[in-house]
Image: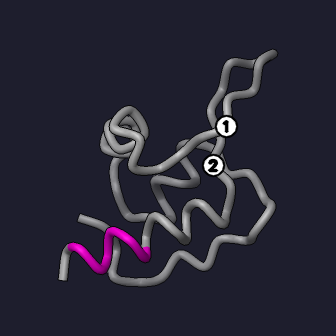
Amino acid sequence: MLTGIFPNAVKGRRYSIKETAELLGIHRNTLRKYTDAQLIHATQHIAGRQLSYDGMEINRFWKQTATIER
């Protein structure tokens, strides 16, 4: 279950998996499941093979999911 507090992530800023999970109030594994299900979209950095999430995408996902959970 997501946090009830809007994450207010900064548009254009990239957040790591850990930061994104903390903003949304969920575990990293839950975030990965949402990503695999394409409910939230991540950007993959080719060199480091690490995923990151745009602030606008985090806010969009929270709004969409918070509406469904209510």
Q: Residue at x 46, y 53 (%)?
A: 21
x then y, percent, for residue 9: 65, 71
Q: Which residue is mark 1?
A: 43
Q: Is residue 69 above or below residue 23?
A: below
Q: Residue at x 52, y 69 (%)?
A: 60
Left/right placement of residue 8 relative to residue 69 reads right
Q: Amino acid at mark 1?
A: Thr
Tell me the crowding category of disc 2: few under 14, some 14 to 19, or many 20 or more residues within 10 angstroms, Cα based: many
Question: Is residue 67 within the magenta segment?
Answer: yes
Which residue range is magenta in the image?
63-68
Q: CA distance from mark 1 to mark 2?
A: 6 Å
x then y, percent, for residue 28: 40, 42
Q: Secondary structure at mark 1?
A: strand
Q: Which residue is mark 2?
A: 53
* Pick the front one: 6 or 27: 6
Q: Are marks 1 and 2 in contact (CB under 8 Å)?
A: yes
Q: Amino acid at mark 2?
A: Tyr
Q: Residue at x 54, y 45 (%)?
A: 41
Question: Is residue 64 within the magenta segment?
Answer: yes
